[in-house]
Image (cartoon, grey):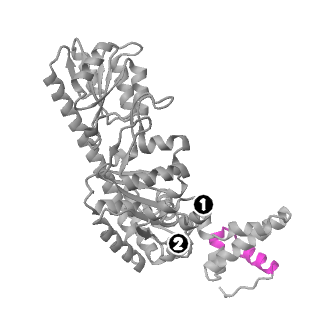
Amino acid sequence: MTGSDASRPTRPVILVVDDDAGLRESFRLILDDEYEVIEAPDGPTALGTLRSAQVDLVLLDIRLPHMDGIQVLERIKGIDDSVQVILVTAVKTVRTAVAAMKLGAFDYLTKPFDEEELFAVIRRALERRSLEREVQYLRSELDQRDGAAQHIIGEHAEMQKLAKVIAQTARTTTTVLITGESGTGKELVARAIHRQGPRRDKPFVAVNPAAISESLMESELFGHEKGAFTGARQRKIGRFEMAHGGTLFLDEIGTLKHELQAKLLRVIQEREIERVGSMHTIKLDVRFIAATNVDLKQAVAQGTFREDLYYRLNVVPIHVPPLRERREDIPVLVDHFVDRYSRRFGRPVTGVSPEALGVMRDYPWPGNVRELQNVIERLVGLADGPVIGVDDLPFDLMFPDCRAKLKDVENLPLKEATEEFERQIILRVLERVGWNQSEASRILGVHRNSLKVKLERWGIRSLRDD
């Protein structure tokens, strides 16, 4: 890469698959000025490349050793259906053309062909890939908007304040640090900032260091050159480059290893990177948004997080409150998720009973909005009627303290421990239904007289006459 190439946006990547090394070199000479060209001499090598590198288009010869072009085409579409494939053949037959088109090939080129024809077909294929990506992006955005508004904007004063901060922050390119417990919607806040800002039409690239092995993390972020290390058979574009012009979201930044913290700090300061195995500098235009569910100040004090990186990230701090601190938003979120999943699953579920909603408002939601979303998805999927009632709620939601109280009985003999646990559940149900023994018996699935006997044995007197 030359100095003038450094700031140029990433070029489309074309994989040339042909067992003739001379033809592969010819394609490279023709295409190298406009595209990144990588090569494979046969089907298995091509498929391995597709699994390890980002490829936009494949020029695929029909006659190949080991497996023919049609077989390779089918495997390519199984790996990544969005990759465009142009078949190259010396003899074009109707049968082969029909088979290829059915499997998703974009077009055919019959040897010999001129450069103008080649470039025209490639441009059309890449335009289709771009359109398909845009459609996929818009669908993703619609799905995010479908749920994001109620996650981010609620009736609680803190959420109204958060919405204003998002709108103000979106107008700038300042680095942002989003804090909050797991499941509060930190990535949705990051997406909202990106979507409302001037970079909305550029990439939003998310990366979670905790989800990537330490050995692969540097290559994942910076990319690598062919031969940079064992197994680096092709050039790989990293997340920094993918986000050029747009936003890079670094989730759970507190899990980033100390060595990579230093490298990230340099990228934020200098706005440039070098791929692993390369000495060439690539200029970046990226907005950085980071998120964490841990106290980074404490991590700095403990020496596990760099102080200089913390201050570089914490230019605009945004805190997302936990769901238990904005309980008035729970009914709004419940209605939203019921509507979403009833439409998605084709189920005639219209809402949640007042009693069930009361249980949901009382529950502490340690997993926050994500936990609420998962619970509603499960309830809608399993619902027998149009309204979700108390009987439909999972045990942990009804009795959140029972699991903790199990520790109180773990050293008792089995019979005594079972009886104590049963007593705790019955008392919890009675409290929930205002000590109405008939209703408690119905929920517990026991006869009212059996319940009465148990209460008398435990010396518990009803606080209410049925």
In the image, taking residue 119 as reference, residue 369 lies left or right, namely right
Q: Is residue 66 above or below residue 375?
A: above
Identity of the residue drawn at 72% across and 70% down: 405
Q: CA distance from mark 1 to mark 2?
A: 40 Å
Residue under label 2: 360
For label 1, count other residues whose C-alpha is less than 10 Å away and answer few (under 14), some (14-19) or many (20+): few
Q: Are marks 1 and 2 in contact (CB under 8 Å)?
A: no
Q: Using the image as rendered, state which of residue 421 and residue 350 is in the foreground.
A: 421
Magenta span of residues: 441-458
Identify residue type, mark 1: Gly
Residue 420 is situated, as x and y percent measured from the top left of the image, at: 78, 70
Q: Using the image as rendered, state which of residue 175 and residue 280 is in the foreground.
A: 280
Q: Main secondary structure of the magenta part?
A: helix
Residue 170 is situated, as x and y percent measured from the top left of the image, at: 30, 65
Identity of the residue drawn at 55% across and 44% down: 214
Tell which circle, 1 or 2, labels the residue nearer the N-terminal end.
1
Q: Is residue 243 above or below residue 165?
A: above
In the image, taking residue 209 as reference, residue 144 lies left or right, namely left
Question: Residue 197, located in which quarter of the rendered image?
Answer: bottom left
